[in-house]
């Protein structure tokens, strides 16, 4: 159950080990990169593009998210997008609303920066998160990114 102590924390030396210890269910590992890879990707992208955060409920780390903010989507300077890059909810914490909190938190940050849409990609298939994202109001765009489906949520 989510508590009133639910929050996002920047990744710091003090919570790095807790963040990298977050593990999804084994049947989901093919669909989302581990936190260590996400943090490495955040490090190699230009400052301000990656927004990695630890999801903490009271003092318990329950997940990790990483948003992308104004990323050059096509790599040619013609289309910039913001959205949810990674979402890792700990196997024993799934189904309790932490994923919804993560999406809402990214939406709030994108809105704060003046954005009107939140993008996400997911691996299709029976163990993938398509139902989760569609249930939150995302719609598919008809695009793919590699082998992943692209979805968008309009932000009021």
Image: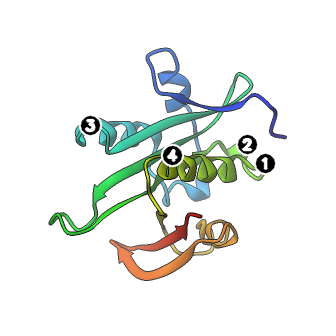
The residue sitting at 39% across, 51% down in the picture is 68
Q: Mark 3 points at which residue?
A: 47
Estimate how packed mark 1 is, as few (under 14), some (14 to 19) or many (20 or more) residues with alpha carbons within 10 Å: few
How far apart marks 4 and 1 lie (CA) works out to 22 Å
Q: Name the residue under label 1.
A: 96
How far apart marks 2 and 1 lie (CA) works out to 6 Å
Which quarter of the figure is the N terminus placed in? top right
Q: Which of marks 4 and 1 is nearer the N terminus?
A: 1
How far apart marks 1 and 3 lie (CA) works out to 32 Å
Q: Where residue 118 appears, x then y in whole percent?
A: 49, 62
Question: For residue 109, which numbered disc appears in the image?
Answer: 4
Estimate how packed mark 2 is, as few (under 14), some (14 to 19) or many (20 or more) residues with alpha carbons within 10 Å: some
Q: Mark 2 points at which residue?
A: 93
Q: Which label lies toward us, 3 or 2?
A: 3
How far apart marks 2 and 4 lie (CA) works out to 23 Å
In this view, the residue in front, 53 or 29, is 53
In this view, the residue in front, 87 or 24, is 87
Q: Earlier in the sequence, mark 2 or mark 4?
A: 2
In this view, the residue in front, 85 or 138, is 138
């Amino acid at each position: 159950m989510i508590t009133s102590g639910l929050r996002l924390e920047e990744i710091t030396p003090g919570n790095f080990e807790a963040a990298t210890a977050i593990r999804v269910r084994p049947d989901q590992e093919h669909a989302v990169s581990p936190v260590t890879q996400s943090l490495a990707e955040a490090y190699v992208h230009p400052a301000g593009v990656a927004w990695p955060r630890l999801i903490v409920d009271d003092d318990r780390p329950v997940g990790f998210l990483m948003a992308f903010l104004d990323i050059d989507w096509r790599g040619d300077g013609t289309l910039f997008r913001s959205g949810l890059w990674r979402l890792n909810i700990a196997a024993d914490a799934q189904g309790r609303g932490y994923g919804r909190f993560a999406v809402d938190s990214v939406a709030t940050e994108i809105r704060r920066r003046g954005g009107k849409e939140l993008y996400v990609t997911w691996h299709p298939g029976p163990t993938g998160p398509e139902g989760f994202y569609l249930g939150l109001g995302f719609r598919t765009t008809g695009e793919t990114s590699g082998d992943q489906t692209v979805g968008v949520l309009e932000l009021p």
